[in-house]
Image: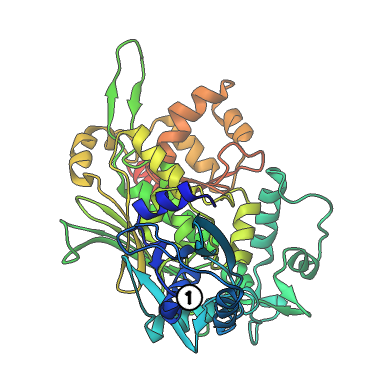
Amino acid sequence: MKLNDLKTLAVHGESERLEFKRTTGEMKEAMQTLCAFLNGSGGDVLFGVRTDGTVEGQEVSDQTLHEVAQAADRFEPPAHLSIRRVRVKTGREVIAVTVDGGFNAGPFTYEGRAYERVSATTRRMPQPKYEKLLLDRAHSKRRWENEPAEGVELRDIDRDEVFRIVEAAKSVGRLIGPVGAKLSDVLDRLKLRRDGMVLQAAVVLFGKEFLPDYPQCELRMARFRGTDKTEFLDQRNLRAPAFKLIEEAQLFCQRHFPLPGKIVSGRLQRVDTPLIPPDAMREILVNALIHRDYSIAGGAISLAIFDDRVEVWSAGTYPTGITPDKLSKSHQSVQRNPIIADIFHRAGLIEKWGRGTNRVIEMCQQAGIATPKFEEITGAAVVTFNVNVLGAQQTAGHAKAQVGTKSALSRHQVAILEACRAEQPLVQLLQVVGRTDRTKFRNLLIRPLLQSGLLQLTVPEKPQSRMQRYRLTPAGEAALRETSNE
């Protein structure tokens, strides 16, 4: 560090990363500030610079450096301090003490007390926050997800669901090599068992039964009339394996999100514009599921659709180190449930680079809608899409009547729905109606049935997967019954 560097630091004296000290008599206060920096994002303490930023320097001896080192011994856990000396004039120097923050070893204390930075001041850290940081420090070894699921045996795990996700992981190249046919071997390969015991993460991902021991594996969905929760238009609560919860949430969105369209000059077909980009909505739903706090037994994932917005709630605050304002900027990927996140990564639903929320923002900007709002409200992480659901429904009113009613289903669509009473691949459905052009078939016949909730994908996260099948929904069955009664 050169003299010019010190002058630059002095100019930026209001920065929360800098403290200016004049004498070693202020050692205790300086160490408390360094402790706060260790518990934050790091910073510098300068001895020999006035509070107004004037570089003055002071006499520095071996005893001075010894006092600094001796004071640093009072940090717990031990902290690394970088100490530099800068000569500013004859017989006078500035001591710059630097620490890096964000260590997993924290929280740090000085003389048995923890400190934090608030704006440009140092203060005692509140006890609840300190205790939470202590729990986070132990998180790498002991988490809710990697604890044994007491009383859960292999027979309590949905084998078909496990191998469905295994096939999805293979199709995207994130599960290489032979897996085997034994459920126990697959769970071991996916790190969902330890010492022969099924982990709680396996219950979240592939469990069969969730009551009474795992009530938190719940998804709550509602469409409300107006802008508050006074009146329900539709409501559904269910407990199911994680991937099926995501699929059900997407179907609920398809059922209640309008699909307004318009005729574009030079195009024969109507151009449909989703209310919220489907990939953005799925990203937020997946994030809510993999980052939530499963130790909250009464918690759940909630999807609430109002006339003027869509909200996704998940139990627990954002992981330590992540704040709502950081999610719209470059940030690290901090995973509260890395085992669960790894399975979603293998299935191709997430990346591991902390880019998920940034991509959601980009997709919303490209679609011309407001970027989502990230908040923490009463101990929950909340994402809000401010979109005009009611207005879009009115715009799409005519389009919604085009499919899903007895007067709108074409004979080919009826044949497709009937065939999909048993899961069918695309090639089989092409044969059912005598078509050969896959693109036109998807756009003109299959896509409207999916959007109206009459059909659903068996692998919704990979629409083009070779393993993809189409199945009839309860709404599709009702539409067929209505058609047969004409």
Report whether residue 210 is seen.
no
- What's under tag 1, amino acid-wise? Cys
* Quarter assignment of residue 113: bottom left
- Near-viewer residue (321 or 25): 25
| Residue 410 location (% of width, % of height) | 39, 30
| Residue 179 location (% of width, % of height) | 81, 57
Q: How many marks?
A: 1
Q: Which color scheme is applied?
A: rainbow
Q: Residue at x 24, y 35 (%)?
A: 396
Q: Residue at x 45, y 53 (%)?
A: 6
Q: Residue at x 41, y 62 (%)?
A: 18
Which residue reaches farthest top? 266
| Residue 78 location (% of width, % of height) | 61, 79
Q: Crowding at label 1, few (<14), some or many (≥20) Cα neighbours within 10 Å?
A: many
Name the residue carrying label 1.
35
- Near-viewer residue (182 or 424): 182
> On the picture, is 233 further left or further right than 106?
left
**Residue 192, placed above or below residue 358:** below
- Near-viewer residue (216 or 338): 338
**Residue 24, placed above or below residue 330:** below
> On the picture, is 52 further left or further right than 163?
left
